[in-house]
Amino acid sequence: GQNIDQPTEMTATEGAIVQINCTYQTSGFNGLFWYQQHAGEAPTFLSYNVLDGLEEKGRFSSFLSRSKGYSYLLLKELQMKDSASYLCAVLDSNYQLIWGAGTKLIIKP
Amino acid sequence: DAGVIQSPRHEVTEMGQEVTLRCKPISGHDYLFWYRQTMMRGLELLIYFNNNVPIDDSGMPEDRFSAKMPNASFSTLKIQPSEPRDSAVYFCASSLFADYYNEQFFGPGTRLTVL
């Protein structure tokens, strides 16, 4: 079966750094996405990785290791507005997006 | 572009009633996706269309659910009859592609409550 695992909830302090992990087991791999979803709102695209390595985009970075079936999203200089759920999604061999359950990130002052 | 548009934003109905959710994708996007999101099950893909043609409806929970896309700028998701367990947020999303870098743009969602 296809499976994506993320921690259910994480807590971090404003100004700090947090790493949200995602492990996956899917039938094939054509890329991994991270989306951000604020409470009561729609998911919005954050990043896309298809090759191994780190992709940096401002305060957010995403890492991928295809051999390990592993990715993480790194958020630096945390701000209160970063409180949200972060969804990991993998594009499988049929180009179907398989979604993780999401990680709720709570930022404390 | 105004982004993906969904209506209504909120719907409260009684069990047994018919519910119709509407979506207007971003102009030029060839793919349209219908999702359902609940606390228990997370984000679930119900069905997606390519150039107005349904490609995969394996996520549609049962025959009570149906979706149509009569043209490139409009799609509906219908539930008949509705049941309390259908209560969820229903998102419509569209994308230019369905492979590789297929960033999906989500609408604001319809929050459905079935009493």
Image (cartoon, coloured by chain):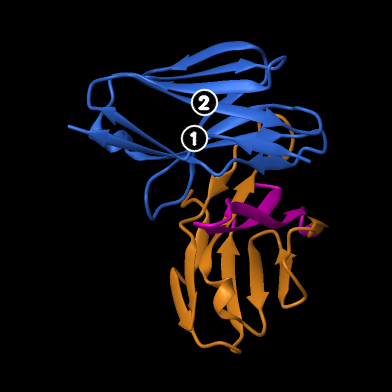
Residue for point 81% across, 33% down: A27
Say which chain tag 2 marks.
A
Q: Bin the neighbour count of mark 2 within 10 Å (Cα to Cα): few under 14, some 14-19, many 20 and up.
A: some
Q: Which chain is orange?
A: B
At a point 59% along the width and 26% down the height, the residue shown is A48
> Which amino acid, by three-letter code, is at mark 1?
Pro
Please determine whether, in this image, residue A65 is positioned above or below residue A35.
Answer: above
x, y percent for residue A13: 24, 27
Q: Which residue is mark 1?
A: A7
Boundaries of the magenta span: B25-53
Chain A, hue in figure: blue
Q: Give the numbered dot on residue A86.
A: none
**For residue A17: magenta?**
no
**Residue bearing the label numbered 2:** A21
Q: Nearer the viewer, residue B106 or B84?
A: B84
Say above or below: B36 vs A58: below
